[in-house]
Image: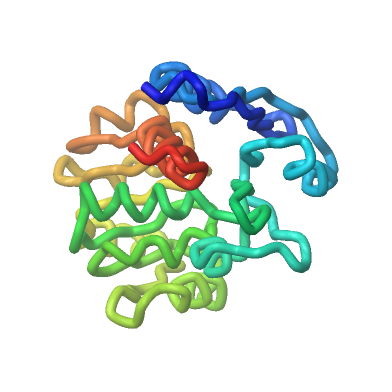
């Protein structure tokens, strides 16, 4: 519990119709009785609120999804690496952009899959590639070699695996992988094996759970992201 004399500070949650991450954030703030008041705001011009953060005494603002930062914004290393910002925290020196989704993913992988071999399935998200560093090797099923190679180029050299274009290549790589990173779209059940762990960055059908050893849901990643958000705001776990 935080001291009662801590002034409660507003924390806007900006979204464009997708506010699913808001509920776990509010639940954790309430559970820890933090002096924060999160509230949702549907906004088209996300960065219009930036000049108001300090004068209004806001703790910062959380974005449902990462966006490219405006010119001149101070960035933490993770946001600079990703080229995206999903949290603006207000500190002594003013607003600072952070990328908590990447931080959460890296922490989750370091805790659960250090040194694993992984295969990325679904839409490529290059902003998340640098945060796959805890893995020993990452391969990718890509729509083209150029896109897959560009994704892998954002990883350390030691962790760059293979780019698969044809179904047969994807199936072969799946058999050599411990972890499947599912980012959405079609998920052929033929790829799934009983020894696989699957980390779902997007919702999966229930029958997927029956085909693999374990499924880690996006809600579990959100729990890690909540910790990253609150830690960046000055409330570490």
- Residue 141, located in which quarter of the rendered image? bottom left
Location of residue 60 with respect to 18 vertically, above or below: below
Q: Residue furthest left?
A: 195
List x then y, in percent, for residue 4: 47, 19
- Please tell me in which quadrant of the rendered image residue 178 appears: bottom left
Residue 112 in percent (x, y) is at 21, 47
Q: Is residue 116 left or right of residue 123?
A: left
Question: Residue 12's image quarter?
Answer: top right
What colour scheme does the image use? rainbow
Nearer to the camera, 109 or 78: 78
Which residue appears farthest toward the bottom when viewing the image? Answer: 157
Above or below, 21 against 147 in this view is above
Decide if residue 27 is on the left or right side of residue 110.
right
- Image quadrant holding the N terminus, namely top left
Q: Is residue 189 visible?
A: yes
What residue is drawn where x is 71% and y is 36%? 57
Give the residue at the far front of this rendering.
5
Front in this rendered view, residue 111 or 26 = 26
| Foreground residue among 165 and 12 | 12
Residue appearing at x 37%, y 50% in the figure? 181
- Work out which quarter of the rendered image holds the C terminus and state it: top left
In the displayed structure, 153 sits above or below 12; it is below
**Percent position of residue 103, x then y:** 42, 53
For the point 66% across and 23% down, the residue is: 39
* Residue at x-position 47% and y-position 74%: 154
Q: Is residue 186 visible?
A: no
């Amino acid at each position: 519990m935080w001291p009662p004399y801590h002034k409660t500070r507003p924390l806007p949650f900006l979204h464009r119709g997708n506010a699913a991450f808001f509920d776990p954030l509010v639940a954790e703030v309430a559970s820890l009785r933090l002096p924060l008041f999160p509230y949702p705001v549907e906004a088209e011009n996300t960065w219009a609120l930036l000049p108001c953060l300090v004068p209004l005494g806001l703790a910062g603002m959380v974005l449902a999804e990462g966006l490219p930062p405006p010119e001149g914004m101070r960035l933490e290393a993770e946001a600079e690496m990703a080229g995206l910002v999903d949290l603006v925290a207000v500190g002594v020196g003013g607003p600072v952009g952070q990328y908590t989704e990447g931080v959460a993913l890296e922490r989750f992988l370091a805790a659960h899959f250090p040194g694993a071999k992984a295969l990325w399935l679904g839409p490529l998200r290059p902003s998340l590639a640098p945060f796959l560093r805890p893995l020993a090797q990452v391969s990718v099923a890509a729509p083209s070699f150029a896109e897959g190679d560009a994704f892998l180029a954002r990883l350390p050299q030691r962790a760059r695996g293979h780019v698969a274009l044809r179904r047969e290549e994807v199936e072969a790589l799946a058999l050599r992988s411990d972890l499947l990173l599912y980012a959405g779209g079609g998920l052929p059940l033929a790829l799934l094996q009983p020894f696989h762990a699957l980390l779902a960055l997007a919702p999966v059908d229930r029958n997927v759970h029956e085909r693999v050893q374990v499924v880690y849901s996006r809600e579990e990643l959100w729990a890690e992201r909540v910790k990253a958000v609150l830690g960046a705001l000055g409330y570490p776990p």
